[in-house]
Amino acid sequence: MLETAQRWARFKRDPRAAWAAYVALAVLLIALPFVTDWMLGRTWVRIVAFALLYIMLALGLNIVVGYAGLLDLGYVAFFAVGAYLYALLASPHFGLHLPFWLLMPLCAAIACIFGVLLGAPTLRLRGDYLAIVTLGFGEIIRIFLNNLNAPVNITNGPQGVNLIDPIRLGDFSLAQPHSIAGIAVPSVYNYYYLFLALALAVIFVSIRLENSRIGRAWVAIREDEVAAAAMGINTRNVKLLAFAMGASFGGISGGLFSGFQGFVSPESFTVIESIMILCMVVLGGMGHIPGVALGSVLLVVLPEALRYLGPLQQALFGRVLADPADLRLLVFGLALVLVMQLRPSGLWPSKIRRREFSAQGEEARHERESVYDAAR
Amino acid sequence: MDIFLQQLVNGVVLGAIYALVALGYTMVYGILGLINFAHGEVVMIGAMVALTVIQLLLASGVPLPGPVVAAIGLAAAIPTCMLLGFAIERVAYRPLREAPRLAALITAIGMSIVLQNVAMIIWGRRYHSVPSLLPVTPHQFAGATITDLQIFIVLLAALIMAGLLYLVHRTRLGRAMRATSQNPEVAGLMGVNINTVISMTFIIGSALAAVAGLMVSAYYGVAHYVMGFMLGLKAFTAAVLGGIGNLGGAMLGGLLLGVIESLGAGYIGTLTGGFLGSHYQDVFAFTVLILVLVFRPSGLLGERVTERS
Amino acid sequence: MQRRRVLGIGFALTLAFALSGCGRETPPPPPPAPKAEAPKPPPAVTVKIGSVAPLTGPQSHLGKDNDNGAKLAIDELNAKGVMIGGAKVTFALVSEDDQADPKTGTIVAQKLVDAKVAGVIGHLNSGTTIPASKIYHDAGIVQISPSATNPKYTEQGYKSAFRVMANDVQQGKVLGEYAVARMGAKRIAIIDDRTAYGQGLADEFEKAAKAAGATIVGREYTSDKATDFRSILTSVKGKKPDLLFYGGMDAQAGPMASQMKALAVGSKFLAGDGVQSPEFIKLAGAAAEGVVASSPGVPLDKMPGGKGFTERFTAKYGQVQIYAPFAYDATMTLVEAMIKANSTDPARYLPELAKMSRQGVTGPITFDEKGDLRNGPITLYLVKDGKWSTIETVGGLAAAPAAAPAPEKPAPAAEKK
């Protein structure tokens, strides 16, 4: 037994093993849409694509909540800004059709500006006061999107913007099926691969940020803002940077959402959406990238998987005992409660976090008061 | 002028309801530091239970005067909500007391979803109409119209708040609650049973929620299983506006938010020369909130947050 | 360290597949066992028809209503037995919940495409119907919405998109003209709920009322989650309109009507189909008296089979909310097209559907080249003695019972048997 453990430990340190794992992972990710489609149907390719989109969103929020410890309940505003920017600049609404490579940086940049706009007045606020202000900010953005169809029609109001250009990279339109080396690649696969590439890029940036000077400054602020300031960290700039970085991830996801859906309307950007993204971050394990990714995937997949409650009952009891439409969200809510009861620091918290939390007594109390709650 | 007065009346009644719900948020926050997102749902359950009892009574054909029927409905709703509040705390929040605070927040969100869907299964998806049990005779008052029901709502809310202030500041339990909110550990050492105090906080907050639930549904004549969410969000905003954790703050915040919303919807068009209309009512309310918090970061009546060393 | 982290993320994703695998174990709903009591049965096939509406959330009462309407149609068709292409067809309704959320709407649409449904009845809201219509179109599946009224839905150039309900433009125009010509409104105030439906209808109403010579004295706004309208009603009252138009749903209109009464706003109250429900009368109580609302189609009791529909529906699912008859008609129309084409393949029956002409329980159903209801009649109703009573039917071919043989049940399959 011990020997196996040792061998496993040695194997884990072996660079060749890591490379093998990488290759296996790459093959898995590339083959995923084909396998999913074959096994479960194309819906699930779409669901997995959405999951990737939400990984990007959740990692953006993770910068603000997980790293810098600023509770943000209006994150969906940045998602909305990105989505509408793409929609307005690449649809018949204004007759503009900007290319994708120009739109993406634009989405990121404008969302970034909105992030700073939100961050600037809230620098002095702490904890739940910040939460309610960000919530208000999110609502303000949604209300403007919903109402700016008069006197000048900018966003087309509640009707939403339709017929948005699909994403196209050069001459390669993601909205059409392609055939690459004799293998048919339907449209939704294209989006999957694009989202996968960008999600990996976002993960990469997140990892680099976490270990950078800025990342450490964020963590320092989260742990103790006063001490961080005393150590020479410019807390104002660092906080603003967290908002800006988080917002730009949201903006990019928003642009992708627009191109993928082909239609945006304000009802996609409600408070509940913000709360769901926060749940992804916390449920998975705040501040821990694999945890956050896991949380996003679960919260996208779970409500869809619960649609099978009807057929499941059919299979188990021979008939449908309870209307699956009644049960679906109930089970979802119960799952949220249950996971938090069993794993209060998330499904997959970082090692440090886990250690701190399991420690009893003084340390645990310190944990409660500071780590998760720099802003109390 | 009569329009302005009318808007003020509208705002005060709305504010009284917000204040009553906001008290529930602020009491829990003051002691646990937790945003109890499920509180709005307790309000909803209160309304639904009261409505069910009222409907049963009316259907039974027993000739009772309207206010008595309403009182019986309320008498059924209050213990139900108390039990529910107690159970939520016991089952969902207590195990997380030492856990990261966001875990408790997500639990609260989960509880809110659960309660909504349970209510959907029990009471169905449709909107329920609430029979008018109290006279809604309109009175003319300096050009504004006020109904008996509105006067009753404001008076009842004021009475309950006065009672709550008495409880917190003049009784043994109130002292224990204040002590726990300041420092749970020291309070524990001084012989306060913290668990009892926290349970009592939830129970009292839920009783207030039951009253608010019946009030809201009777005032608007509608009850529906998602009615708690927006109301809860608004009440939470009110609590923060006044300074969360502070009872007087919740009352002030509730009243102010009601009046701000009402005047905002009424006058925002005139103020902006017709550019923005009543659809920016919430923008107006949130802008006021943000401005208040920028200048007073812990709300109107909240204590200044001391920088921790 | 970093490398391990990347691996961790990979495993997180892998876990997702595992979870997807959970879904795999429970295949899509197995069709009800085909009836095989006939001694020499023709080959039996099961044809799936999708039904999508929000079954959870604030609009779930309407969503469930739509779903029940489709269910009733399917049950009746199955009870009667339908022969298509020489086979006895059993229809299976695949109901999905789109939560009135555009994103979920597209996922559900893809799910129905995967389940190989022959046609889709839905969605309820324009906001979910429009993005989903692209997926149905790309997959070549026919979609009939019983209740999406946004004109854009059929303006996308998709041949597969139909609706059995007048769109906002058609209805807003009728309402605007009616308000001025028949209700004698000169000063009109408008409130809408800032949803795609409410705002669209209110805008069209405003245009038509202005064209007919009325003055719009005020435009106020609320939301589809609001219950307090006192402040906007107070503003409205200050402008002294003689008619108030509301673009929105019954759940808001009910409290709005009673608050109007409490505030002694003296104007008449007019609204669209979202308000023409029994629910509205319950919610508004005494204040409902005298309220006028329109609804596309012909009154149910004037239609052959309409009364029967109401009776059968009520016996099974309780009171009709609003759109159940339209969902019923949509389903019946879809199946009739299949019977006429003698095929359940969308590509084959689509032409039949496009040139369909039949009497539904809500009125005559023919589509124009966009897929909108052609000359849809619109009926105006007034609340009198706590009930909706018909005032008049405007436009369209009106109720033309002579045009159709008017079977007792709307039985598209009758002649095929």
Image: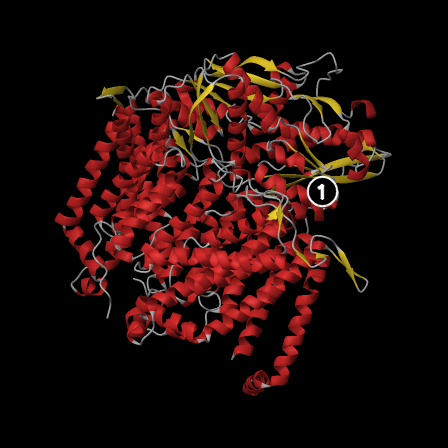
Q: Chain of mark 1?
A: C
Q: How is the image coloured?
A: secondary structure
Image quadrant where one finds the N terminus of chain B: top left
User: Which of the two residues, A90 or C58, is positioned nearer the viewer here?
Assistant: A90
Give residue C169's position: percent from left, percent from top: 59, 27
User: Which of the two residues, B8 or B76, is positioned nearer the viewer here?
Assistant: B8
Q: Which residue is mark 1?
A: C137
Residue C81 in view, yes or no: no
Q: Residues within 10 Å of mark 1 (few under 14, many from 20)?
A: some
Q: Which element is circle 1 on?
A: helix
- Decide: is B262 above or below A66: above
- Decide: is B64 above or below B89: above
Give residue B80's position: percent from left, percent from top: 33, 41
User: Which of the two residues, A102 or C78, is positioned nearer the viewer here?
Assistant: A102
Give residue B35's position: percent from left, percent from top: 34, 53
- Decide: is C84 above or below A175: above
How many marks overall?
1
Q: Is residue C237 left or right of residue A270?
A: left
**Farthest residue toward the left?**
B170
Give residue B309's position: percent from left, percent from top: 23, 71
Q: Is residue A127 left or right of residue A263?
A: left
Dividing the picture into quadrants, the one containing residue B177 is bottom left
Q: Is residue C335 left or right of residue B192?
A: right
Residue C356 in view, yes or no: yes
Q: Amino acid at mark 1?
A: His
Dividing the picture into quadrants, the one containing residue C399 is top right
